[in-house]
Every structure is written in C-alpha cells, then in structure tokens.
C-alpha cells in the first residue's frame, strides 16, 4: 500500500518560533537502516505529519506544520549547482521560470561551483580588503549552521558584516531587552500564560502567526485569565479578550506611556520590587508625569477611561505577562515600544515568578538560536560585544585567529553599502532579501550591482536570480541539527528523507567554502559543531547533543546536569552589572512617513496563516498554496465603499517608492484609513512599497507604517 509509511522520524516544525515537535511518516523508495540519516540513494517521501507531545505544542500543529511538508519535492527544487550564463542580466526577470533555470544558468559540478563561488569572494577580499564582503545567514537553518556561517564571515571574510532576518523581526526588542534586562531572550515561556491572571497581547496576531501559542492564550482565557489585546487591527483572539483595544497606528508609545502615568499617579507600582531589582525608576516616573491619559488620548486614539482601566488591571494583577510581535518591533520607534513594555513589567514587579514575564514572540523557527549563535554584526555568540577586547579574546583563542573589533553592518545598511560601492561581494544562505527587504527597488538594485553573489538555497528564489553561483542546499526535513524556539527550548531536528540529486547539507557547503578561504575545518557531523559551540556559549551549559538526542528538548539556561532548564528566569537578579534591571524612559515620536494629502492611507504588512515570510517554502507547498493562492489587500468595508471597489476587484496601492496591483479583500477587522498587504507574493511584492527608515537602536525598518494611496486598478 503506497499510503502506508515504512518508518517515522521525530523532528521539529520548520516554520514559526513556537517550535512544535512533530513526526514525519515516511515511505521509503529503497530500504533504509533505522537510526541513521538516509542517503541520497535512499531518498524517501514524507506521506504525512502528526503532532508530538512536545513541551510547546502537546500534540497540536497548525495548518502549516500539518500540511506544509511537501515543498522539498517541488519540481523546481535545485538538484545541482548552477553557474550564471554569460551575458544574462541580473534581476527579477518576469519571464524567468524557476522550474526552467537553465535558461539563465548552466549546471556545474560541486568542485567547479564551489571553486568559482569562493574564488569570486577571495579575489574581492584580496583587492579591496575584508570590508568588501558580507554574508546573510538564515534563521531557517540549524544552530550549528548559524555558528559555522558567522564563523566563516568573521574568520574567513575577516569582518563582522554578518546578519540575518532577526534584523527585520525583533532586533528592536532585543536592543531594548539587552539594554534594560541584560538579556535578549524571553523571561518566561508562553506556557506560563496558563498561570497568569492578566495577559497582554500587543502588536501581535498569534492566531495567524503563532497559532499553537494562540491555543494557550485561548485556554488561559477560558480558565479566567483576563486577556487584554492592544492593536490597531482586530483579530480572531478578540473573541476571547476581556478588553480588545484598537489604537491609532503608530500611537503605541503614547498609549503605553499613558498606562505608566496611571500606574505612577495612582501609586500602583511595586515599590519593594523596584527597590530590590531595578534602577532608574525616579527618572521614569518624572518622564511620564505629563503623559496623562487625557494628553495621550489624541495621539493613540484610546479614551482616557479605557487607558486607566487596562493600566489598573495589569498593575493590580497578582501575576501578569506581556507578549508582543512585530506590530511593536517594526517601527522607527520599535525599541522605544519595547522599552515601554519592559517599564510596565518592572514597575509592577511582573517578572521572575511563574505567570509573569516579558515575551517577544519569535518569528522563524530558529531566529532565537541563530541570534544566540552569533548571526548578528555587533555581537559574537551569546551576545558578547565584538568591541570588548576581553570577550573577543576568548573567541580568538577558540578559533585561533584575530577578530575584527568593529561592529559590522546590518541588513539594510549592507544594501546601502553595496549601492555606495563599498561592499562588492556577498554570500547569502537561505534568506531572500529580494523579497524581504524594505524598498525592494533599492534592495534589488543593490543585489544587481554586486560584483559577485553566491546564493545557497532550495530553489532559484528571487534573490538567487541575482546570483553568480547557486549552491543547492538541504531542506529542514533532510538534515540533522538543533533549533531554539521562542521559549528558549533547544530542540533536536532529525533528517527524515534524503536531499534530491546532488543537494548537500548546509553545514557541509559552508565548510567547503571555508576550506577555500584557507580555513582548515574538518567537521564530520553537526554534533562536532555543537561541541565547539558549547566551548564558546555558556548558555548551552548542561545541554549536550547526546542529551538532546534522548530528551528532544532542553530549555536554557540549564543549571545542572539532567535538570530540565529554567522556564522562568530572573527571579533573583538580572544579568546586568549590579544585578538590577534598568528603566529606560521614552517620548512619543511620529512615524517616519506620516500620512498626508497625497498619501492618506496607512500601509501595514505582515504574514498570512497559510504563507510563511517570502513564500519560498509555502507557495511551493500544494495544500497551503491552494488555500491562499493569490495576493490580496485587506481593507475595511467602508474603505472599499469609498474607493468604489467591490471585494475581489483589483486595486492599486502606491507609495513614494513603488506601486503594486492586487485583489481587494473586505475585512471588518481592519480600521478605516489602513490597508494590510502580506509580503509572500512576488507578483504583488509588498516590500516594493515599504519604508526603509530604521529604528536608530535596533536598525529595524518601519514595515508597519508607510503612507500610501489607494485607487481602483
Ligand atoms: Fe509550525 Fe508554528 Fe504551526 Fe507549530 S504553530 S505547527 S511551529 S507553524
């Protein structure tokens, strides 16, 4: 029976940061030895997926985890290295058929492709210095691959110009958490919501973006937890909310400071906690004196009475948690937003106990782990600043080389440096900046002007269309490796099937590139990389590869051999000098590009339940693409009426940077004066429209607010 699986393999979902554990049910094309990774000759095919009883999902999966497993078998999957044909111009060619890449590229052996890929980069380094090269790693890869990639950039390229999609996701949250708490990770898992009396969800839409985490919030609400949702848009979880508060887009700092004003003015803060665990409260209290609910209400669009009500509910709860997403982080004031949330928690003593905490919901399945492993330009693994000579020396000893003391450039800064001519060569692993960066015309101009671009991926993505050399890589279900989810749970992923054709594991490809940079790497398996990571990352203390093979998941920090790890942290002290957390006052700032008479509507962008990020995987997954096959813009019914456009008809959206045409969708949860566009669809690429203005601290672009103009197409 072709529908009966020959074997099962336990692993982790490749999509969001919830990190659901799952089981692949595999049909073998050839006999396969149990307990070993399948070889290319043994191939295998995933028939279906079931949820496992993992610590963050307890058997549950969302539609992506359950049905989004077939993209590795898509006919356009890369099976051999490709080299660009002479004379083919670089760019996103509307006539390019990714299933027929040989119109633009020729196939090559691994030896030829790797030699050409590395030689292009080494010669640019030789003639222009280390500053001429940069690399984007990927949160879609394992911890071991992230470690190797940043090590290659730092020790082979010779600079810190290495970054990844955290820059477009929670970089501002991490900047605020590092500044105020001394640690960029969550203080408590989302399962702790079940212990909380009040849960605040702001700038996030978990039913769409973290669906299994959303089930915990629903369960908590059913058990009596007061759910407070703060967002410009409505969402499915509103049905479970005690209060759902819609605020003016960009009005979050005003709203949160008004809540702090109420807490200070009414003496609702926790003086004992503040005295023991924090510093800077007096400055915070002074800074919010004039930001009364009455003063902030015109800026945030929330009535003074509602502001007082939700501030009192949060402050007087015995146990309260705050969760946030990219509605908070993706602003030019994203770091200020996160600072406000941290101030709320510190003022009210809502960290360090079960049912309390601060939790930025992470996007990609390994964005926490990739960040921990050092895919960040200003810090080494475990967030050790590159400019700290003592900390840097430890890595110089581990890697037996001298490291650059200067912080590298971030994602958008690298694109600017390419256009300015200082960065000339790039190695991009598993990221798709030709779809994910803001102001795509600028980003694509940058990619086209690179003298040498190496792309490592599963498909000829939009970014790979700019490449000189494309290296065929391995999908998540085809590799062994560890990942770290939003809860700080380090989990074991296992190869279920073999990669097709000559595609190779990412760690193997990075090592081959490193060897061509003269680095004498000789890892035989990711477990050897993990062992090296443990030498440089104290966060992995008491977590071994062998332990993860047996237990599947261990949370960090883990304080003793065999202990499960700390679900809730910072009960006694924060990892800052003196052990105290810090308040960081803020003031409301307008968006970088406010709406005006020419561009009167707010554009916001994001994901859909069925499509993940730039769509590279989910648009090649049959069920998911059947569920959401076309790009659509969501607008309030009244907004459509004003435009004279019926649902299903085309509209054009224009900003100062570009225009797209796509189908209009009526969505009663949208506020008037705003349009939402998902960024997964190349035929109506949302990021042609977005504003590249950066938060000054996290260097994250303002994806959540751009001024646009709507018209019938
Ligand atoms: Fe995968 Fe996230 Fe869905 Fe879980 S909630 S199945 S991790 S996409």
Image: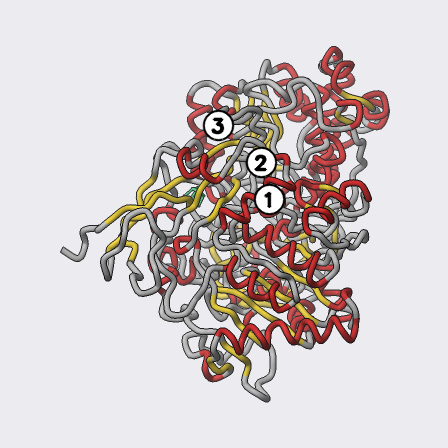
User: Which residue has dot 3 on it?
Assistant: 191
| In the displayed structure image, the side of residue 525 where residue 59 appears, left or right | left
Alpha carbon distance from label 3 to label 1: 28 Å
Q: Nearer the viewer, residue 194 or 244?
A: 194
How far across and down, in percent of the image, does residue 645 sit?
Answer: 50, 61
Instruction: Name the quadrant of the N terminus.
Output: bottom left
Q: Which mark is residue 4?
A: none
Instruction: Name the quadrant of the C terminus.
Output: bottom right
Q: Is mark 2 within 8 Å of ligand 1?
A: no
Looking at the image, do the residues carrying marks 1 and 2 touch, with CB atoms under 8 Å apart? Answer: yes
**Which residue appears farthest toward the top when viewing the image?**
272
Q: Secondary structure at mark 3?
A: helix
- Nearer to us of marks 2 and 3 is 2
Q: Nearer the viewer, residue 50 or 281?
A: 50
How far across and down, in percent of the image, does residue 440 sit?
Answer: 64, 66
User: Which residue has dot 2 on it?
Assistant: 540
Q: Is mark 3 within 8 Å of ligand 1?
A: no
Q: Secondary structure at mark 1?
A: helix
Categorize mark 1 by other alpha carbons within 10 Å: few (<14), some (14-19), many (20+).
many
How far across and down, in percent of the image, does residue 454 sit?
Answer: 59, 70
């Amino acid at each position: 029976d072709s529908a009966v699986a020959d074997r099962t393999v336990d692993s982790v979902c490749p999509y969001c940061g919830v990190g659901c554990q799952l089981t692949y049910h595999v049909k073998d094309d050839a006999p396969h030895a149990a307990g070993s990774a399948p070889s290319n000759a043994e191939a295998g095919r995933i028939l279906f997926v079931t949820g496992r009883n993992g610590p963050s999902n307890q058997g549950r999966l969302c539609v992506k985890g359950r049905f989004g497993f077939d993209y590795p078998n898509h006919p356009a999957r890369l099976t051999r290295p490709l080299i660009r044909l002479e004379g083919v111009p670089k760019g996103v060619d509307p006539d390019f058929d990714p299933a027929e890449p040989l119109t633009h590229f020729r196939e090559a052996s691994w030896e030829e492709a790797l030699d050409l890929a590395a030689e292009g980069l080494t010669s640019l380094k030789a003639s222009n210095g280390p500053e001429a090269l940069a690399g984007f790693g990927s949160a879609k890869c394992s911890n071991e691959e992230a470690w190797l990639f940043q090590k290659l950039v730092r020790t082979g390229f010779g600079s810190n110009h290495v970054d990844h999609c955290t820059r477009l996701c929670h970089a501002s949250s991490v900047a605020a958490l590092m500044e105020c708490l001394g640690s960029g990770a969550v203080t408590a898992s989302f399962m702790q919501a079940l212990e909380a009396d009040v849960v605040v969800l702001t700038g996030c839409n978990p039913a769409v973006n973290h669906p299994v985490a959303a089930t915990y919030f629903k369960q908590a609400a059913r058990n009596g937890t007061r759910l407070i949702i703060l967002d410009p848009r409505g969402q499915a979880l509103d049905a479970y909310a005690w209060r759902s508060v819609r605020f003016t887009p960009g009005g979050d700092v005003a709203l949160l400071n008004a809540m702090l004003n109420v807490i200070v003015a009414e003496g609702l803060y926790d003086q004992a906690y503040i005295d023991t665990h924090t510093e800077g409260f007096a400055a915070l209290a002074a800074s919010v004196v004039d930001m009364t609910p009455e003063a902030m209400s015109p800026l945030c669009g929330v009535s003074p009475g509602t502001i007082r009500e939700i501030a009192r509910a949060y402050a007087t709860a015995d146990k309260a948690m705050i969760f946030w997403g990219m509605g908070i982080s993706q602003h030019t004031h994203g770091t200020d937003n996160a600072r406000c949330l941290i101030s709320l928690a510190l003022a009210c003593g809502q960290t360090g106990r079960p049912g309390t905490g601060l939790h930025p919901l992470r996007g990609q399945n390994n964005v926490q782990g990739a960040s921990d492993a050092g895919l960040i330009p200003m810090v080494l693994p475990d967030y050790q600043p590159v400019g700290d000579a003592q900390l840097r020396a430890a890595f110089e000893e581990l890697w037996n080389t001298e490291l650059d003391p200067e912080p590298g450039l971030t994602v958008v800064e690298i694109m600017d440096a390419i256009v300015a001519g200082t960065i000339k060569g790039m190695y991009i692993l598993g990221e798709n900046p030709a779809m994910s960066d803001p102001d795509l015309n600028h980003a694509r101009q940058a990619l086209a002007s690179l003298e040498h671009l190496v792309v490592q991926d599963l498909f000829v993505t939009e970014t790979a269309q700019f490449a000189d050399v494309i290296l065929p890589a391995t999908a998540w279900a085809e590799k062994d490796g560890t990942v770290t989810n939003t809860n700080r749970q380090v989990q074991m992923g296992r190869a279920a099937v073999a990669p097709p054709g000559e595609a190779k594991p990412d760690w193997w490809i990075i090592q081959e590139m490193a060897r061509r940079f003269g680095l004498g790497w000789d890892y035989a398996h990711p477990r050897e990389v993990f062992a090296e990571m443990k030498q440089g990352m104290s966060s992995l203390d008491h977590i071994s590869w062998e332990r993860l093979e047996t237990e599947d998941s261990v949370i960090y920090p883990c304080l003793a051999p065999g202990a499960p790890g700390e679900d809730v942290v910072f009960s006694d002290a924060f990892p800052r000098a003196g052990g105290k957390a810090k308040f960081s006052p803020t003031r409301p700032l307008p968006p970088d590009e406010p709406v005006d008479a020419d561009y009167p509507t707010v554009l916001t962008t994001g994901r859909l339940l069925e499509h993940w990020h730039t769509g590279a995987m989910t648009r090649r997954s049959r069920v998911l693409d059947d569920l959401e096959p076309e790009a659509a813009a969501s607008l309030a019914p009244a907004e459509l009426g004003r435009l004279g456009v019926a649902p299903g008809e085309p509209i054009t959206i224009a900003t100062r940077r570009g225009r797209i045409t796509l189908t209009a969708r009526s969505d009663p949860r949208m506020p008037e004066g705003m349009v939402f566009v998902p960024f997964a669809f190349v035929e109506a690429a949302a990021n042609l429209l977005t504003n590249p203005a950066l938060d000054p601290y996290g260097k994250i672009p303002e994806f959540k607010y751009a001024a646009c103009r709507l018209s019938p197409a």
